[in-house]
Structure formats: C-alpha cells, structure tokens
Amino acid sequence: MLLLLLPLMRLFPFLLLLLLVLLFNYGFSESGVGAGYQLMVAVPVEYEVDFKGRAFLVETNQTAPNFRVALSIEAINGKYSCSLEVFLGDVKVWDSGHYSRFYITEKCLLELTMDGDLRLKGPKERVGWKTGTSGQGVKRLEIQRTGNLVLIDALNNIKWQSFNFPTNVMLRGQQLDVATRLTSSQSNSSLFYYSFEIEDKKVALYLNYGKLRYSYWGFQPTMNRSITYIKLSSRGLVLFDVKYKKIAQIPSEGIHPLRFLALNNETGKLGLYYYSPEKGKFEASFQALNSTCDLPIACRPYGICTFSNSCSCIQLLTNEDKGGADCGWAISGGFCNGKEAEMLELDNVSSVLKNVTKVVNITKKACENLCFQDCKCAAALYFGNASTDEAECYLYKLVLGLKQVEKGTGFSYMVKVPKGTVKNHERHNVKRWVFVVAGGVDGLIILLLVGGFGYWLVKRRSHALHSRASTT
C-alpha cells in the first residue's frame, strides 16, 4: 500500500506530477519490498519555497505513531533535494541526505536492483546515493519495529542498516559505540553545526565551526570509568563499559517510555522524547540545557545573552563601523599582518564554550597579553577566585556563547578589537559600560518600573493636594 503526504499548497498540480511508474514488487508487504522494486517521483518544474512532497512506501504494523519510510522531494536553497527518509509519526528520525544532499531536476527514482543495491537516481541514470550492497545477496528492504531500515538476504541476515549511519536522532534500542557521534544537519546557510559525541570518559555536546570545536555540555560516569558504548532504553540513556556493565545513566523524568533522543538542528539542545497519548505529540522528558543563555548560539557573534534571556550587542564601534554584520566584528581574530589591535575588558561576562586552551596560575594582565600576542586569538576569559587564589585563563578564536553573570563571580571577558574602535570616554569607564550594554534590556525594564512608580507617586500627591484645596 502506498501512502502519500502532500503539501496543501498546489495539491492538485503535484498529484499530476507524482508518477508511480513501475512496482516490481516481489513479496511486497506493509513492512518491506523485494528486489526489483522501483518508485519514481517527478519534480515540480517551478521552484516553490518550503515545498515538500513525500511518497510513503512501507510502514511497520504498530499502534500509532509507527515507523514509515518515504521517498521525499524538498525545496532547499533554491533547488530540489531527493532523499530516502524514515519517520516516527511526523518526526523524521533518519535521512539519507543528512550529510550530503542529492539535488535533482525532472525526477527522482528509488530502486532496489536485482543484484541487491538500493539507489537514488536522477535524470540520465545519475546515481546520487546508494548502499553499495551489490552482489551481497540482498533480497528485501524492510523497516523493523525499532525503526531500523535494513537490507536482508534470503536467510534474514542484515547486509546494510540505517542504525550504522546515525544522523541527529537515536532511537530506543539503538546502540552507539565510543568514537561515534550524532550531528545536526549541515545546512549551506550556516557555518556552524552541532554534534553529540561518545568519548572514552564522557558524552558531550560540541559546536563546530570549520576546524574549531568547542564543547558546551558534558556528562561523565563517576570514578573516571571508561565508556565502550551507549544505548537508549525506555527509561533513559544508559552508558556501558567494556564488560557490558552499566556504569551510568541519564534518566528520563517522565512516566511514559522513551522513543528517541534528538539533537536539535537549530539550537543544539539535546533531549530525550516520549509520546504523550493525551496530547497526541512527542514531548521532552529530559533536556541537557534548559536555559536559553546556556546555548552556544543564543546570540549572534559578539552578542551577550542577558539575565532576561535577551541579546545585547557589544556596540562600541566608531561611526564608520556601525551597521556591520553580526554584532560587530568578524567571527575570527584576524589581527595578523601588522594590523593594530587593543583589548576591551568586559566585567561580569562569561562564555558557555569549553574545550579551549587553558592556562592556570596567571595574572589578568598576562592572560590579556597571551591573547594580544596571538593573531588567531579573538578573546580571553579570565577567572580569578579571591578566596582560593585560583586564577585561570581561557583563549578563544571565536567571540560567541557570551552570557551575563552575577557580580563578584570573578569572571572577566577580554575581546580583541581594532585599535581606535573603543571610544575614549568609554574606554576609561568599562564597568559602567558593561552594566549598560550587557544588562541593557534589564536596565530598561528597571528604568520603566522605577519611572512608572515615580509617576504614580507624583500623581497621587498631586491628587491629594487638589483634594485638600477643594475642601478648604
């Protein structure tokens, strides 16, 4: 049975475009198709923003929400992309085009060849994606009850499986070994992407930008125990050692069994999700990061996330530099080749980014000089604990992930800027500037409250004086 999920916009024209040409369906069932199966979908002639067309070919025999497999056409960056996808209900949990898009025109063909290779093809027999299983005895494509898309031979031996090619979702029952990772979709419109990585001593979230890699959340077993693999159960994410022994768990906080773990493509949040029958949708029972300001890209580069979860730019720019991209300067150091620079110190500002160069037992001035003398350094975070005499210096190549912190916590963030960028009168009063800029929105709210209260007092006093005059 073939199920179609089509966009509401221009529904009738797309029905004409959808061509189901040839179904060599040996042993067809709801959960699988045989060797020789083909499915072709025609691509719209004109480009339509946000267009999505899907032809569902197989599904599991389970109570909804169940797993379904679809051949999908999607409008992305001015072109049409074709991919094979797996859905749990309406949530996409696997995508053949997650890492590399197959852009096509005219048509897209899905075929399971007679010699056992699963392929996506465009016009002129151009192959855009394949499993590479030719000659391995593959007889069927099936979707298992776990959501694992598999190619099997006549003896039901698995020759290829989607579980070996994780995207940004981990399903219940799925196992990931150490050195494996989930990643967000790497869109052409963004230079950044997120990854959830299984390491020897911890699982961690990372922000990736080119060759730069900064962590922003982590979880590790006690007693420095090593991880061999992780597995998602109905009650949480379980960590195992080399002896298959459970050593730690990130538990679910809900009563319903978990269905999947997902790394959000847009925010970098990590969550454990269950299906709520009462609400008819998936909801998070655990999230690694609950505060907006703990997200790595809560604000744009050179932006500060304030206590009110809003963003304030570092706007100490000369008149010539105002109106630039992002919140100010480029997102890398760029102060090489003799270009002069200076350091701008911001009190009570920290960064959520970790996994950076760290120097201990150092003065603030020495920390500043380390960044100043390194042309690739864009900023330095200094932490000085007066009660323990501890001093730490962190060097960054990105000015990102900044957030406002309480006074007296000992954090000082120093940003490298072109010399002469900081206005003279502001350079001599940085602490006052930080209060205005980093807490600009908070200060405005306080100002409005104080102003409104003052106005109310004046009006009340004026009314009282008027009443007395009337009585007299």
Image: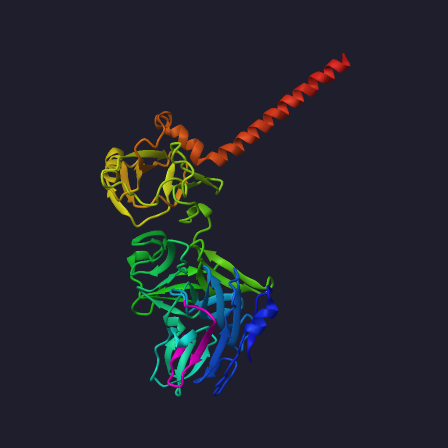
Color encoding of the figure: rainbow
Above or below, 122 against 366 in this view is below
Foreground residue, 89 or 72?
72
Looking at the rendered structure, the number of numbered marks drawn on it comes to 0
Above or below, 42 against 334 in this view is below
Q: Residue furthest top?
A: 472
Please state the horizontal and vertical placement of residue 102, each as a whole percent of the image: 41, 68
Examine the structure image and report whether residue 142 is included in the region drawn in magenta.
Answer: no
Do we see residue 59 in this rendering?
no
Above or below, 190 against 114 in this view is above
Q: Quadrant of the N terminus?
A: bottom right
Which range is magenta? 102-120
Please state the horizontal and vertical placement of residue 219, each as a whole percent of the image: 36, 56
Q: Residue at x 50, y 80 (%)?
A: 31
Foreground residue, 226 or 24?
24
Please state the horizontal and vertical placement of residue 470, each as a whole percent of the image: 76, 15
Do we see residue 365 in this rendering?
yes
Q: Residue at x 30, y 34 (%)?
A: 343
Above or below, 327 against 251 in this view is above
Please state the horizontal and vertical placement of residue 10, each as a whole percent of the image: 59, 65
Foreground residue, 333 or 46?
46
Q: Quadrant of residue 367?
A: top left
Q: Residue at x 25, y 33 (%)?
A: 365
Q: Quadrant of the C terminus?
A: top right
Examine the structure image and report whether residue 116 is included in the region drawn in magenta.
Answer: yes
118 left or right, relative to 15: left
12 left or right, relative to 177: right
Q: Residue at x 30, y 46 (%)?
A: 397
